[in-house]
Image (cartoon, rainbow, N blue to C red):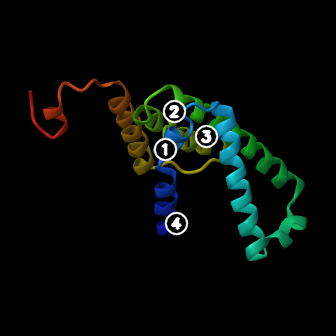
Amino acid sequence: MGGLWLLSALFAAPAILAKIGIDGVNSNLATAIRTIVILVMAWGIVFFTGSHTGMKDISHRSMLFLILSGAATGLSWLCYFRAIQLGDVSKVVPIDKLSVVFTIVIAFVFLHEQVGVKSILGMILIGMGTLVLVFIKEKSRLFMIGGFL
């Protein structure tokens, strides 16, 4: 499963493609085009693997929460595309990754998932890393490669 997580991160990483793609394009339209590509790919895989036969077995509760998840994802993508259109990808992406922190907290509160020392440390590091990447100004290029001023 670790390999799938790494592939997921790798395929999510090229925000540069989105930044280049939305140049001169309305961010909502760009999100819709991206969504169509994802829709075609996802349903293609569902039919190719024969997974579509499981549609009848999805409970109403599961369907409701899948729909809510899709709506939240859609809103997230609309905000994300607008943010990368207006700002620096190198600042937008770290802020977007704060979703990891929010997810752990929400899972603890609503799903009663265990949050151990590793999770808390990870949340702190992600939060601190985001603050550094977004708010700390660079003094010089020398500082970036390990020099001191």
**Callout in the foreground (4, 2):** 2
Image disc number at residue 4: 4
| Distance in Å between CA atoms under marks 3 and 1 | 26 Å
Percent x, y of residue 140: 17, 27
* Residue at the disc numbered 3: 106
Q: Considering depth in this image, is 24 or 70 the residue closer to the camera? A: 24
Image disc number at residue 15: 1
Q: Residues within 10 Å of mark 4 (few under 14, many from 20)?
A: few
User: Could you tell me which secondary element the residue under label 2 belongs to?
Assistant: helix
Looking at the image, residue 22 lies above or below residue 48:
above
Q: Residues within 10 Å of mark 1 (few under 14, many from 20)?
A: some
Q: Residue at x 69, y 36 (%)?
A: 29
Q: Earlier in the sequence, mark 3 or mark 4?
A: 4
Q: Are marks 3 and 1 in contact (CB under 8 Å)?
A: no
**Callout in the foreground (3, 2):** 2
| Distance in Å between CA atoms under marks 1 and 2 | 8 Å
The amino acid sitting under disc 1 is Ala
**Callout in the foreground (3, 1):** 1
Percent x, y of residue 23: 54, 33
Q: Are marks 1 and 2 in contact (CB under 8 Å)?
A: yes
Q: Earlier in the sequence, mark 1 or mark 2?
A: 1
